[in-house]
Image (spheres, rainbow, N blue to C red):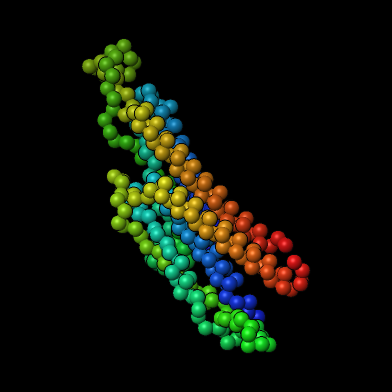
Amino acid sequence: MNGISFGTTVGLLKNAVDGAGTSHSVIANNIANVNTPLYHRTDVSFKDSLAATLGTDADPNQLEMAATSEKHFAIGGAEPPADYVVTSQKDDLTQQRLDGNNVDVDAEMAKLSINSGYAQTMNQLLSVQYGRMRQAITERL
Amino acid sequence: MGFYSSIEVSASGLSAERLRMDVIANNIANVNTTRTPEGGVFKRQLTIMAQKLDESRSDSLDMNDSSKRLAGVQAVGIINDSGPDRLVYDPMHPDADAQGYVHMPNVEVVKEMVDMMSASRAYEANVTAIQEARAMGTATLGLLKA
């Protein structure tokens, strides 16, 4: 993404919301296959990879916010790299049922709920961040 | 990739569970059926579920593009249960054999009820997954509000 950097927050939150969407798809797929014989559930993780994108160097193509005093806080970094990795693996360890399926619908519903709460938290943070930008642009509280 | 692809995944679960429910209801309705168009006694039917993958990417384990890979579930067929018929001694029945036994369907109502509950709960779980996906999508869309 080229343009003015607003710091890493917006890009990071965007990736978090995106990851939560992928995670939701995977959990929904586990739930849809709750009665499929021999199906093994899939686990997805993106948070470690997302955290690894923190603190990366600024994109030299982006404009940094200028500081007129050395006492100003530096607005470090730019958008985190968009290509964070979503990894997933088949769960072959969980005890399977007689039909060879190891989806536990209660556990999946709990995961779904956690993931949804995570996505809504990230959305809320994004909304607050946009609110701050709007405040800075319009100079109105 | 978006929230709508995960709704499609859950929707495939909804239609597969609904078909399973139809088959179970048909089994219960035919619990005493001794004559069928194919001839002979009614056989209990079972739905076969299979994981659905996007064919174009079925060789790939690249999960970065999970929207293409995960496609939910599908019912691939309905088969007859080959278990033995229930034999009921009733010499007056028009379908009784020479020994006076009537071949009744191999449907056990209790088993069907249990299957029905499992189908119904799985359906509910998929509905909840759709609701959560919608809530997440709506929250993101809400960012556009001033």
Compared with residue B9, is residue A9 higher up or lower down, i.e. above or below?
below
Q: Residue furthest top?
A: B92
Q: Nearer the viewer, residue B42 or A99?
A: A99
Residue for point 65% across, 80% down = A4
The C terminus of chain A - image quarter: bottom right
Residue B142 sits above or below residue B84 on the image:
below
**Number of numbered tags placed on the structure image:** 0
Residue A58 in sight here: yes
Across and down, in percent, residue B112 comes to 38, 32
Query: For this rendering, which residue is in front, B135 or A30?
Result: B135
Which quadrant holds the N terminus of chain A?
bottom right
Residue farthest to the front? Answer: A71
Asked if one can make out residue B5 in the rendered structure from this viewpoint, the answer is no
Location of residue B2 by image quarter: bottom right
Q: Single out the residue that lies furthest toward the left.
A: B99
| Closest to the observer, A59 or B85 | A59
x and y percentages locating residue B25 in the rendered image: 44, 32
Foreground of the two, A62 or B33: A62
- Residue A111 in percent (x, y) is at 45, 53
Q: Is B26 located above or below residue B131 in the figure?
A: above
Which residue is rendered at x = 53% and y = 66% of the image? A16
Residue visible at 41% across and 28% down in the picture: B28
Residue at 40% from the left image edge and 64% from the top image edge: A88
> Where is B47 relative to A139, above or below?
above
Q: Is residue B5 left or right of residue A110?
A: right
Q: Pinpoint residue B146: horizontal percent, then vertical percent.
A: 72, 62
Taking A94 as reference, is B75 left or right? right
